[in-house]
Amino acid sequence: MDLYRAHVLVCGGTGCTSSGSAKLIERFEEQIAANGLDKEVKVVRTGCFGLCEAGPVVIIYPEGTFYSRVKVEDVDEIVTEHLLKGRKVQHLVYVDHKTHESSVQKSLAEIGFYKKQERIALRNCGVIDPENIDEYIAFDGYQALGKALTEMTPEQVIDEVLKSGLRGRGGAGFPTGKKWQFARASQAEHKYFVCNADEGDPGAFMDRSLLEGDPHAILEAMAIGGYAIGADEGWIYVRAEYPIAVKRLEKAIEQAREYGLLGKNIFGTDFSFDIHIRLGAGAFVCGEETALMASIEGRRGEPRPKPPFPAVKGLFESPTNINNVETLGNVAQIILKGADWFRSIGTEKSTGTKVFALGGKINNTGLVEVPMGVPLRTIIEDIGGGIPNGKKFKAVQTGGPSGGCIPASLLDIPVEYDTLTSVGAMMGSGGMIVLDEDNCMVDIARFFLDFTVDESCGKCTPCRIGTRRMLEILERITEGKGEEGDIEKLENLAENIKNSALCGLGQTAPNPVLSTIKFFRDEYEAHIKEKRCPAHHCQALLNYVITDKCRGCTLCARKCPVGAITGTVKEKHVIDTAKCIKCGQCMANCKFGAIIKD
């Protein structure tokens, strides 16, 4: 076995790959060989490190030096200075947004972004080569499967998952052990175990990153689940838009079959289990379990009424269990370390950790995993590094189109299933979009309704027609055409849709509207009664005003496409609001900050 004195870990997740990390790897390998270090230093392509804002990321062990925003032209310096001469390249070392401290003397766990995280589902992401089964095995991979098959009965496996308190990480938070119990109880010749990797929420990339960074963890969990419920076949339904994840899953399945960890008589037992991949075409509704099964079967992805539930009559008319990617990412560790260990993390009713895709108006965009119950403030301020450009935090949207907005006044609430539901939001799959003072909450609601209307499968009238009527009202309000009674119409439509839509996606579609009305009703009223957008965001309600800072340079007048600005040189100019088309060119080109939105 080759022993190396240093390992260069380069992020190979989608974010860093799109920023050129593949070229970094090529250059590192070239320069390491050119300097005669190829027997001493190994380059490893990993999954996502989490801190996407700092990508492309390179970490060098054993020191743990964290280099951020690395470019191809930086590689030569890192090789000659750090790997050859042992001197860290100070100007490339990650600097914390909040404290402005360099991480040059810190371990990864001491960096602000990682300090308050606890990684279970993401434990191997950014640590191992996801395309090398040996590295997964070196980090206790497939030990849980071996333990389950050789030391536990299926009922004992289910009991351990039940006792752990693990709840579904993809939406409503149903207890995972109960799902398995129901599928186990169904009597049938053939059963299926399905992984839902159809991640469709705007701004969500938790499942994608886990599949890219640790695919064997999902395969192992599916095999354990298959053993528990009595299934011999598994399916992973994953978006075709996730090419890196798909490639690594395909490779992982091949490797697991080659090692005898998938297929016939696994670990010398009478348990046989294999896994197939089905690519989805990007329909949001196929994240709903009955629509997902229809799509796997080659039919149109539309939900069907329940009961019968999938545990009784699911894929190909057989009993089926469906869990999402992150849920499965916890299973092997629960079997290996025990239910009590998992329950010791999080809260009584929300055990373990939760992965969030942190995006929007936040300094540290990326992937975070925190114990359930941590205050929302910890995620936004400590891990996320606060709001950029000195702006004020306004709200955070959790749960995507099925979720809601949590205002600044509730920044200290614990992040757990029941608490989020009680304030009109939800955990959902884990999208977390941060909004600042410049975001209009009416427009945010309009954005999510626009997404839902576009993605509705159209099967049921409440979702197909009801959400469109809601969107039309929201569009009128943001265009300055809102009327008295519009808020009440939105609330009535929302309640009717929630009570009558066919599937969970339709039933939760009004949540962003209801939560923004609940916490930001004054913004709706300003749009309707005063024809004013308090956030100065809705274009139709804006007026551009030239202040006394104007120096009469005439640039704004020259840039105005409709000649709405008049004035003489070195004198304050004026905007004719009747002519102004509100394009914003005047404000964008003013060098003196003399033009403001009113």
Image (spheres, rainbow, N blue to C red):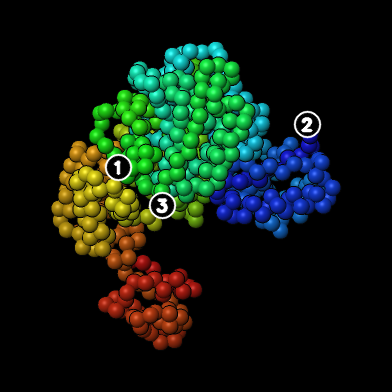
Label 1: few (<14), some (14–19) or many (≥20) C-alpha neighbours in 10 Å: many
Q: Nearer the viewer, mark 1 or mark 3?
A: 1
Q: Is residue 349 above or below residue 211?
A: above
Q: Which residue is disc 2 drawn over? A: 1
Label 2 amino acid? Met
Is 126 on the left-hand or right-hand side of 459? right
Q: Which residue is mark 1?
A: 302
Residue 511 in the image, given as x and y percentages of width and height: 28, 43
Which x, y percent locates residue 471? Answer: 25, 54
Callout 3 environment at 10 Å: few (<14), some (14 to 19), or many (20+)?
A: many
Q: Which mark is residue 436?
A: 3
How far apart are the alpha carbons under marks 2 and 3? 53 Å
| The C terminus sits in image quarter | bottom left
- Which of the two labelled residues, at mark 2 and mark 1, occupies the earlier sequence position? 2
Q: From the viewer's perspective, is residue 502 above or below residue 241?
A: above
Q: Residue at x 61, y 46 (%)?
A: 12
Question: Which residue sits at x=61%, y=33%?
Answer: 255
- Alpha carbon distance from label 2 to label 1: 52 Å
Frontmost residue, 101 versus 326: 326
- Left or right: where 24 falls relative to 253: right
10 Å crowding of disc 2: few (<14), some (14-19), many (20+): few
Residue 404 seen from this side: no
Quadrant where the image shows the N terminus? top right
Q: Amino acid at mark 1?
A: Glu
